[in-house]
Amino acid sequence: MDLTSVLGVLMAIAAISVGDILEGGNPIHVVHLSSVIIIVPTTLSAAMVSTHAHHVKAAFKEIKIVFLNPKINLQETIKSIVELSTQARKDGVLSLESKVAQIEDDFTRNGFSMIVDGKDIKSVQESLDVAIEELEEYYHGAAHYWITAGESAPTFGLVGAVLGLMLALAKLDNPQEMALGIAGAFTATVTGIMCSYALFGPFGNKLKNKSKDILKEKVVILEGIIGIANGDNPRDLEMKLLNYIAPGQPKKSQFE
């Protein structure tokens, strides 16, 4: 679980709630069902208009990685590549055929299958580059949906507030009901802003940032496949791939 996402949302809500309480308010009064109904479905629906249907589906499918870290371990990925590189250098690329068939990841399996089948390096790289570009577009589109929703939410919050004020002003003959109506109307503005800056916008940006880790792993795999196809020394290949691990994260060589 990604605690920065979970704690970020909870702390944002908690901070506003505490501030409201200190001012003598009650945070529960900010939760207004009609405001939520006006803003959330409308925002999410409007964001669909500017997003490809394929990416709308991806946005809801991949939202899980905002809260759950993608299963990526570059150190283990590099270790596996180096092991295959060592075997290929010792017994030839064809010796990898049985192990390649057991690889679950489609990208990795397809890449190694191409070099085992004797495809030229340029064709392999071009094919895998296209796959990486498509994956990048997939996550970019998914993130774009949530970012667009975040940009739209405050406006629909304003719409909800105006609708509430229109109804409140119709009760001029009853000041108490009108005051309650005005108070309820402004909850829509609060809801829209919270959805924008504490939920939808951050969801999109976190999804976009985490997709970079997924894409980096694919680049590492691509570089490893090309290195094996070129017959690179496993030690040199490992040194090259370890450079993709971010500073501050542990880097362990198999040859130490």
Image: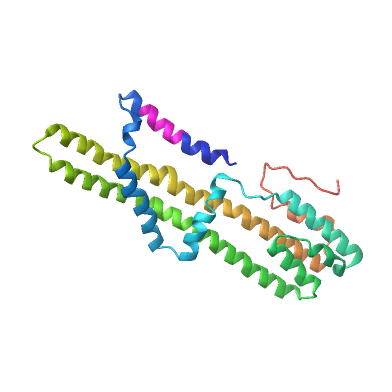
The answer to whether residue 255 is left or right of residue 148 is right
Judge whether 168 appears above or below 217 on screen: above
Residue 165 falls left or right of residue 212: left
Q: Which residues are magenta?
A: 11-19
The residue depicted at 31 percent of the width and 39 percent of the height is 32
Q: Position of residue 48 (x, y in %)?
A: 40, 60
Q: Quadrant of residue 218?
A: bottom right
Q: Is residue 154 visible?
A: no
Q: Nearer the viewer, residue 220 or 147?
A: 147
Q: Is residue 98 above or below residue 74?
A: below
Magenta span: helix, strand or loop, mainly?
helix
Q: Does the magenta segment cover residue 13? A: yes
Image quadrant in which the C terminus is located: top right
Quarter of the image where one finds residue 195: top left
Q: Residue at x 62, y 50 (%)?
A: 70
At 57% across and 62% down in the image, what residue appears? 136
- Magenta span has 34? no
The colour mode here is rainbow
92, above or below 160, in the image: below
